[in-house]
Image (tube, rainbow, N blue to C red):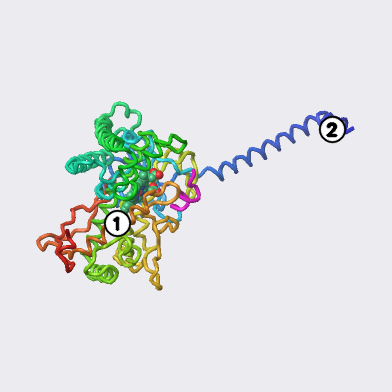
Amino acid sequence: MISNSMWSWWSELTGNKEELTLALLAISIITVVVSWYRSRKHTFPLPPGPRGLPVVGYLPFLDVNLHHEFTKMAQRYGPIFKLKLGSKTHIVVSSSDLAKVVVREQDDIFANRDPPVTGIAITYGGQRITFLSSLNVVTSMMWGKSLVDEEKSKDLGVELREVISKIVELLGTANVSDLFPVVARLDLQGLLREMKRQKKVLEGIFDRIMNERIATKVEEGGEQAGRKDFLQILLELKGENTASSFTFDQIKGLFTEIITGGTDTTSTMAEWIMAELLQNPKILKMVQDELEEVVGLSNIVEESHISKLYYLDAVIKETFRLHPPLPLLITRCPNQSCSVGGYTVPKGANVYLNVWAIHRNPEYWDNPLEFNPKRFINPDGTSKYDYNGYNFNYIPFGSGRRKCPGVRLGEKMLVYLLASLLHSFNWTLPTDKEHDLSDKFGIVLKKRKPLIAIPSQRLSDKNLYE
Ligand code: HEM
């Protein structure tokens, strides 16, 4: 019955060809209009941005201090803008609202990186990297005093410093291969070849450390000092041969990441903090008064004091605000086209979050250029912000799933280092040199002129310095 009536309806309709044509036409028009409207709703324009030249794009006009340049451009083009550099599209996000869209709301889309060619060469299995110089703390955590011979251990420190600074230099050098991937195979500047050479040197150092540890029996090695170091744990896991075991390459990869990611960021920050304190003697005195109260002038700083140094913590946070070591974070690369702030961000673009601009934006911070640690302290004395990346006005360690995995270590290393330097010594600036606080862009944001400061004894007992 049902099928009969259906077909009779169809035959009636097809009998009247004019009506059928009109109905089909009306349906087609409605479909076209609806799909046009829908597609229009979902296709946002590309963000605004400066025009560049053919082939090279905006490259010839870009100042080397990218963070300053991008901040100026945001004032002109808005909180999201695009520019073409070589054959790649670059998108710069400079507001905390849009940063949130990238690293929170669309974190899964922006979880990829687009590492430089030299960055890929130094990793084991194409993972990731960053960089140099609180090297001692990091290496002693990783492999303690692994080499039995003290002299050998010193030589190793020197070798490691050299190779890491070369690697960092290579990572920070602008590479034609990154801007024009079509010519990457030619390695026109020879940077990839040099990075591969440095990787071999680094690998040789890691091999020596691991072999010596294995030769002096895995069980004894790290435990001599009473606790296991990182190498010891990894080698033991390797020995177990389970799913959580590490291969030698993975161990080397981890070491490379920790050394390169954790050393230069930390030492650069220590320099900025000292520079700001020497510029602000009243704040320096408050830090030293706190240290005197918590640690006492007849003691040196120990780990147990760190959590009680609230004012020093605020000073460090304020320095991170004004001088974030990675001012544009590490570029993210969306795995599909998506929209941010009403604009399309194309798949594969390089996306920068301009943390330097966000940290100095007067909409988020009162008197943003003033060095004022109190903004990080609540009226009840507790800390106002943390490094977890949930408050998008303050993200020195990044945010989302690609935020810095070394936050805790970096934070602890810094407080300990600064507390020790400021508690054990009084510091002054040389009178014949101008105290300069300007910066220069690089893989890590450095002081344009290195800090020179003169220490003098602060503690009562000379024996505490031995
Ligand atoms: C003062 C200390 C440090 C600062 C300011 C810092 C800052 C950062 C920032 C801003 C990022 C990029 C995050 C993002 O794009 O959202 C990052 C990534 C990274 N950091 Fe740190 N970092 C520090 C210390 C460390 C330490 C001690 C380690 C190792 C133990 C480390 C290892 C890494 C690694 C491996 C990445 C890449 C993460 C990824 O791509 O998923 N960092 N760091």
* Secondary structure of the residue carrying numbered label 1: helix
**How many discs appear?**
2
- Mark carried by residue 414: 1
Q: Amino acid at mark 1?
A: Leu
- Please report the bounds of the magenta region as a residue range: 98-108
Q: Amino acid at mark 2?
A: Met
Q: Closer to the N terminus: mark 1 or mark 2?
A: 2
Report if the beta carbon of the residue with label 1 is closer than 8 angstroms to ligand 1.
yes
The reply to whether residue 43 is visible in this rendering is: yes
Q: Residue at x 67, y 40 (%)?
A: 30
Name the side, left or right, on which 290 lies relative to 100.
left
Q: Residue furthest top?
A: 186
Q: Nearer the viewer, residue 337 or 40?
A: 337
Whether residue 421 is in magenta: the answer is no
Gap in angstroms between the C-alphas marked 1 and 2? 79 Å
- Mark carried by residue 327: none
The reply to whether residue 175 is visible in this rendering is: no
Q: Position of residue 379 (x, y in %)?
A: 40, 73
Q: Position of residue 183 (x, y in %)?
A: 32, 28
Q: Badge 1 local density, few (<14 within 10 Å), some, or many (20+)?
A: many
Q: Position of residue 398 (x, y in %)?
A: 39, 51
For the residues labelled 1 and 2, say whether their Cβ atoms are less than 8 Å apart.
no
Residue beneath disc 2:
6
Q: Position of residue 234 (x, y in %)?
A: 37, 40
Magenta stretch, main secondary structure class: helix
The image quarter in which residue 416 lies: bottom left
Q: Residue at x 47, y 44 (%)?
A: 344
Whether residue 103 is in magenta: the answer is yes
Is 122 rendered above or below residue 386? above
Name the side, left or right, on which 3 lies relative to 225.
right
